[in-house]
Amino acid sequence: MKVLKFNNGDQLDAIGLGTWKSQPVKVEDAVLSALKSGYKHIDCAAVYGNEAEIGKAFQKAINQKVISRENLWVTSKLWNTAHKAEDVIPALKQTLDDLQLDYLDLYLIHWPVAFRPDLHGFPESDDDFLSLQEVPVIETWQAMQEAKKQGLVKHLGVSNFSVTKLKDLMGKTDNPPEMNQVELHPFLHQENLLEFCHSNNIHLTAYSPLGSGDRSTEMKAEDEPSLLENAVVKAIAKQHDVTPAQILIAFHLHRHTAVIPKSTNPKRIQENINSAKVNLTDEDMQQIKSLDKHYRYVNGKFFETTDGKYSNIFDE
C-alpha cells in the first residue's frame, strides 16, 4: 500500500474508506468489514450523520483486536455551522464523542463557507449564511490550531479549497494546511492544484473518485458522464483484468494522492483496496489524461447566494 508521509513521520494509507452517503444502518458493518479487509484509513464528517455508528465499529474492531487505535487513521471534518472560534472545539469534541475516540488523526475545514451557528439542515435563504468577512477562514483555522495544541487532533487541513484560497490562508499563518481534500478523477484532473499542493508540501485526498453516482438527484446534472462506463476506462480495466473502479482508484495512487472510494458492499470494499496492486503503465496514464474535461460532479452551486456572499466557490 502506498502511503503519504507527514512532516512528523506519520503515514497515511493512500486508499481509505469514504463514508459520505453511507446510511447509518449500513455504515457500522461497512467500516468493520473494511478494517477486517486491511483498511487503516477511514474518512468521516459530522454532516454525514453517521459518526455514532462508525464509532461503534471502531470500538468493535479495537476490542476484537482487528486493529489498534495507533494503526487506525481517522479523518473528520468541521461543518459550516461551527466556523466561529468559540464553536470549533465543541464541534470537534462532539465528533470525538460520536466516534468514541480521544483524538483525530486529521481534521479538515469541510468547506470555505460559513453558516449561522443555529442553522439546522441546509440553508433556505441568504440569511442562513455568514460571509467570510463576518467569519474569516483564519479565525476558524486558529481555533483548529488550538485544538491541536490541546491534543484533540494530530494533523489539520482543509477541503474544497482552490489554489487562491490556499494562498490566502497560507499568507496569514505559520501553520499551513497539511491536507486538501477535493474532487479528483479522470474527468477532473486539476493539474494546477495538484502541482501547487505538491510543491507546498500539502497532501491531496480525492473524493468522488468513482463519480458519486448515488448522490441525491438534486445534485445531479442531466446526462452527466459516467466514469465507470467510460470506454477508455473499461478498455484499460480489461487489459489489466480488473474492474473499472479499480482503474479509477489506481489512477490516484499513480498521482501520489490519497483516495477515499465509498462502499457498504463487502465485495466492493475488498476490490477497492486491492486497487493498490494495479500497476498502470505510462500509456495507460496518457490515455486517462485525455479524458480530462474539468467536469465536477459536486459543483458547489448549492452554496452560492444571491446577495454576493458566496459565488464561484472554486474560483474558476
Image: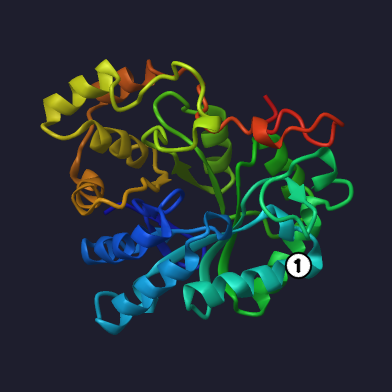
19, 202: nearer the viewer: 19
Q: Secondary structure at mark 1?
A: helix
Q: Amino acid at mark 1?
A: Asp
Residue at (42% x, 60% y) in the render: 24
Across and down, in percent, residue 189 comes to 46, 28
91, 14: nearer the viewer: 91
Residue at image mark 1: 87
Q: Is residue 19 left or right of residue 190?
A: left
Q: Image quadrant of residue 300?
A: top right
Q: Quadrant of the N terminus?
A: bottom left
Whether residue 174 appears in this view of the structure is no
Q: Is residue 311 left or right of residue 196?
A: right
Residue at (77% x, 48% y) in the render: 171
Note whether 281 is above or below 62 in the view shown. above
Q: Image quadrant of residue 247?
A: top left
Residue at (19% x, 20% y) in the render: 235
